């Protein structure tokens, strides 16, 4: 029995950890802790010493604290000073089913898997025997509507970079009627010049985050510090709707705001075509995450998709943060209810491997156009297969939907209680957020909460974002809300 | 005893494999096979069936055959049809110490390591306790001359993209005297416009390969198919010396050719400064690999380094393919004999993790400027530490030097025997290459050799490149040369 094997193994390497009693009715997995437990302020003395050491090697200005991943369990992250925190940020939303899930430990202890970890192949030239099967049982089993083709990549930025390339290639092939490129195109591309390297563009939205490599960064507009001093492309940037909350009180205003943004999108497409830099693709997140958890209505996305089709632009939905079940559906765009929601869907983070799906018509016409040495990592696909098994077996999408409702309801209550501090509670599944009155208050709330054992993330200018793992149960929601309430009560 | 554990384990999962007798004097590791063994033409029927299946999901035009990585050992790659080939391409030069090395299997079976694989952290915000130590014992223990800072990344392209960003940030900080950016810069960068997103450039060389994401691709000029239809930057491209062989017969001509290229570099730097797109950095490979294994003299690199310094450009040496011991030294640039060879050195492939070293003065001034979700993968650092142990324990740099001499000597002999087919044998360590008279002949030689059990790579227009693992012994050199000789004899 693998579960027992890995469970014993878990016990053996974690003898210092405390276990939840099996008789408890709390809906936590039996391998998890039952609550946060704090020993020092965070970062504690051991974290501070390690910070000094790492500072000799790297910029450590973004480091919160150092972790003891061996001791971390489920929703609880343990730091090197022995502090155990309820983690609702989960490594920037990239831990799908909590820390040290027994099912993933099982993958590691299965001798059949060793070779996959030890021999990383160049997937584009020498794939392993089980590669088609593994893709079918993992990524293709959750493929977005209308998509049967998927390309794995190592990370989110590489996924988006290659998704952009796929759209450019598709667009130019359309333009030249699928004929071979001219000699002039072949020659000019070698020296970065048009027509071989054409002046095509990707339309993105203000507040978007699509990654930090140079191509991605040209579509990222969330914070100046990400972009300052880095050369970019003259690509069009449309406004993303700024919805007013509570939504039910601003139905007309929000509809007008979305219409304004869509009109601007069409104007930009026309303007950039006239400029000689046609829009080959539109890229958008179902919920702008890094930019401040900005939502738009299904109607907005549906109309945007139609605009893309009308103007011959590919429609790329970036699900790097929204994908993987956190909204209560596997893909954020499923909430739009469209039969034909996208041409390209990129992913990473909770899916453990990066990559993107695309429609058949966007498949590259020749080899080596979309290519690199590794093209992903089959050891991540192994983990993903097991994550998907757990999501199905433990009905985690339902768990997310249930916990998400409780979380959002709790945030509504808190903002009613503390209207001078909190506003704009919003979310889908457990992909929730709430705004503080300003960034200093937001940061202060986060630090106080952390010292009480609740680790959250921030985004936008003054937003707290909640990104728990899919194993975040209602019991954890209540822990979160209790701590947050304590912090706010003191703040008041 | 871990070694025994993992060795037994290896036996248990590979019961079908044949072992080399311990009494053999052949200098192969005891876990390896002793020779190629072919059952079908390559790709065989099982590979062809899998190719059809994978073709439903991805473009498979670059796939050679499907592999049985479980059965592969050391220098021998086994395919799904039971063919066992001497592999001198090693997953596009990315397998450092051969397939299924017992030391790496040991890493997998060590229970202390399980958590590192199962819980991938966001290294930039929540590093694991042992992260500084692991960096010190792995990457910093092999740091290039004058470098004490290193940033890990997921792959080669991300490493170069972030190395470019590091140089841009450094250059702009110099330009504005390390003052804070102006409000205008902060505003304009959000919309991709200068001065916030400045018109800076990276100078690269014709024939270079630095990756395929949009920033990297603007410095890649090896094959048109990589660049066609992808928008690019107007950045300067200098000629890379085209040396004539044998070197000793063309000393004067080659010195003139290198001087011509260096002169062009200086001209371009001046020209692009006048254009308003100053060169922030120069990027170069110690040996242009993908572009055709093009070498230049230490004198060329030394002068280029001086030109960079003279004009205030950072000097970035891309060691993604040359790094990791394959030239007989840990870094290709060590062969130049300079005290101060580079400002930035990027790596990936054989180092298993991507990343780059840089001088102290290039460290980013603020957090989140060089950042992404994962910033590498500590499980790759674990493997790298063990690879470095093996390199030291088994004196693999000496092995490479010895095998490289034997290989190059053998290639000289072959090109003397077959002067109408082969020319320009060249190399450093086992990083060797030879040209065929044309691409059709090159391709035909490679296919015939593969069917006799020798798997090689190609590069440039008509070049065969040899990229064996560091465990490639003289015994393997002789196998390689024997097969190549047989193929050429038939071709004659």
Image: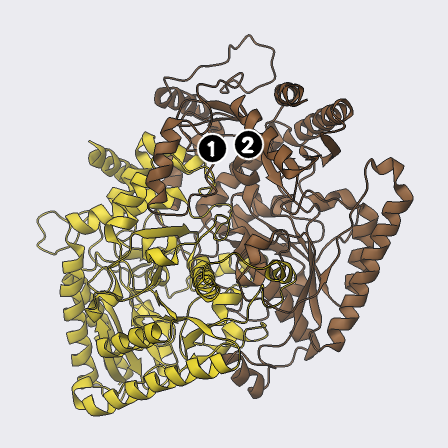
Chain colours: A brown, B yellow
Quadrant location of the C terminus of chain A in the rendered image: top right
Tell me if mark 2 has few (under 14), some (14-19) or many (20+) residues whose alpha carbon lies within 10 angstroms of its own.
Answer: many
Residue A64 at least partly seen: yes
Q: Tell me where residue A233 appears, x and y as whole percent.
A: 61, 68
Judged from the image, the secondary structure of the residue bearing numbered disc 2 is: loop
Q: Is residue A15 above or below residue A363?
A: above
Which residue shows up at 23% across the image and 86% down it? B245
Q: Quadrant of residue B233?
A: bottom right
Q: Confirm or deny contact between disc 1 and disc 2 (CB under 8 A).
A: yes
> In terms of depth relative to the viewer, which is nearer, A462 or B401?
A462
Chain to which mark 1 belongs: A
Q: Tell me where residue A68 appears, x and y as whole percent.
A: 40, 29
> In terms of depth relative to the viewer, which is nearer, B170 or A257?
B170
> In terms of depth relative to the viewer, which is nearer, A306 or B404?
A306
Judged from the image, the secondary structure of the residue bearing numbered disc 1 is: helix
Q: Is residue A241 above or below residue A392?
A: below
Residue pointed to by mark 1: A104
Q: Quadrant of residue B281?
A: bottom left
Residue B230, numbered label: none
Residue pointed to by mark 2: A97
Relative side of B46 to A319, left or right: left
Chain to which mark 2 belongs: A
Relative side of B181 to A477, left or right: left
Q: Is residue A474 above or below residue A172?
A: above
Q: Tell me where residue B279 appears, x and y as whole percent.
A: 45, 74
Tell me if mark 1 has few (under 14), some (14-19) or many (20+) residues whose alpha carbon lies within 10 angstroms of its own.
Answer: many
């Amino acid at each position: 029995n693998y579960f027992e094997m890995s469970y014993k193994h878990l016990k053996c390497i974690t003898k210092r950890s405390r276990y939840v009693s099996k008789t408890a009715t709390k809906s936590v997995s039996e391998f998890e802790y039952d609550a946060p437990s704090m020993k020092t302020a965070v970062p504690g003395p051991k974290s501070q010493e390690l910070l000094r050491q790492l500072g000799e090697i790297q910029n450590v200005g973004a480091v919160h604290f150092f972790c003891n991943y061996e001791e971390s369990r489920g929703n609880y992250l343990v730091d090197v000073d022995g502090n155990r925190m309820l983690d609702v940020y989960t490594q920037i939303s990239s831990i799908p089913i909590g820390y040290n899930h027994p099912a993933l430990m099982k993958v590691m202890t299965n001798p059949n898997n060793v070779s996959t970890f030890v021999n990383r192949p160049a997937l584009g030239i020498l794939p392993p025997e089980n590669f088609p099967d593994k893709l079918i049982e993992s990524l293709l089993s959750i493929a977005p509507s209308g998509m049967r083709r998927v390309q794995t990549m190592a990370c989110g930025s590489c996924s988006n970079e290659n998704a952009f390339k796929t759209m450019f290639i598709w667009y130019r092939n359309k333009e030249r009627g699928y004929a071979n490129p001219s000699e002039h195109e072949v020659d000019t591309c070698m020296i970065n010049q048009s027509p071989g390297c054409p002046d095509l563009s990707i339309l993105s939205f203000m507040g978007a985050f699509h990654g930090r490599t140079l191509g991605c960064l040209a579509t990222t507009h969330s914070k100046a510090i990400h972009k300052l001093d880095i050369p970019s492309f003259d690509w069009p940037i449309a406004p993303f709707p700024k919805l007013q909350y509570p939504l039910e009180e601003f139905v007309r205003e929000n509809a007008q705001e979305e219409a304004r943004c869509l009109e601007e999108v069409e104007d930009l497409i026309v303007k950039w075509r006239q400029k000689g830099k046609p829009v080959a693709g539109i890229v958008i997140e179902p919920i702008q995450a890094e930019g401040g958890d900005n939502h738009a209505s299904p109607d907005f996305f549906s109309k945007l998709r139609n605009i893309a089709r009308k103007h011959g632009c590919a429609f790329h939905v970036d699900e790097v943060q929204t994908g993987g079940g956190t909204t209560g559906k596997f893909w954020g765009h499923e909430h739009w209810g469209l039969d034909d929601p996208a041409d390209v869907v990129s992913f990473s983070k909770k899916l453990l491997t990066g990559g993107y799906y695309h429609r058949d018509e966007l498949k590259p016409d020749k080899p080596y156009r979309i290519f690199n040495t590794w093209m992903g990592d089959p050891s991540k696909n192994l983990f993903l297969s097991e994550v998907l098994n757990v999501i199905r077996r433990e009905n985690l999408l339902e768990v997310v939907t249930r916990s998400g409702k409780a979380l959002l309801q709790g945030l509504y209550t808190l903002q009613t209680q503390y209207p001078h501090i909190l506003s704009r509670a919003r979310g889908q599944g457990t992909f929730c957020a709430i705004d503080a009155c300003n960034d200093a208050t937001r940061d202060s709330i986060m630090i106080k909460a952390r010292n009480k054992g609740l680790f959250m993330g921030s985004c936008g200018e003054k937003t707290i974002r909640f990104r728990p793992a899919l194993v975040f149960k209602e019991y954890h929601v209540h822990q979160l809300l209790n701590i947050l309430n304590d912090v706010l009560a003191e703040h008041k």
